[in-house]
Image: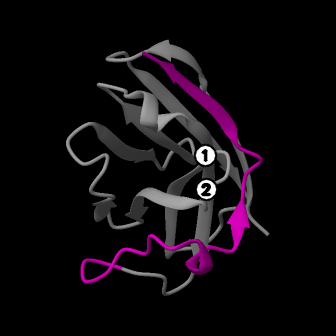
Amino acid sequence: QVQLVESGGGSVQAGGSLRLSCAASRLTYSRYCMGWFRQAPGKEREGVAAIVNDGTTKYADSVRGRFTISQDNAKNTLYLQMNSLKPEDTAMYYCAAAVGWCGGWWYVPLRTSEYQSWGQGTQVTVSS
């Protein structure tokens, strides 16, 4: 099973930036999808951004234009660059992975049920 470890969370003022990282181990698959999700207190976990191994990406409407997902295949690391942060971005952020025929140029999964492996999460707090 794929193992995921997130890092890079912290506290920042509104308008600031953070970059999250997710180190993946045992990701020995030719086809996979990876995504970032977040969960605020009292709310359901929601998809933020996802990427397929061919580079196709998808973003939630709430973060499009502010967040950028990317991957370094050589390092088996997933990133989430978050700019222009808002207080409503405050949440625990999770990295997730799905292997096999999870998507491609025609479809990028962004639902929690579409991912099998999860990290422990990293907290992001944005103050006004």
Q: Is 111 included in the stretch rendered in magenta?
A: yes
Q: Is residue 121 above or below residue 84?
A: below
Looking at the rendered structure, the kind of residue marked 2 is Lys
Looking at the rendered structure, the kind of residue marked 1 is Ala
Judged from the image, the secondary structure of the residue bearing numbered disc 2 is loop
Circle on res. 40:
1
- The tally of labels here is 2
Image x and y of residue 78, in percent: 51, 45
Q: Is 73 included in the stretch rendered in magenta?
A: no
| Circles 1, 2 touching at the beta carbon (< 8 Å) | yes
Question: Considering the image in quadrants, where does the C terminus appear?
Answer: top left
Question: Considering the image in quadrants, where does the N terminus appear?
Answer: bottom right
Circle on res. 43:
2
- At x 70%, y 43%, the residue is 121
- At x 30%, y 61%, the residue is 57
- Name the foreground residue: 49 vs 51: 49
| Image position of 102 (left or right of 54) | right
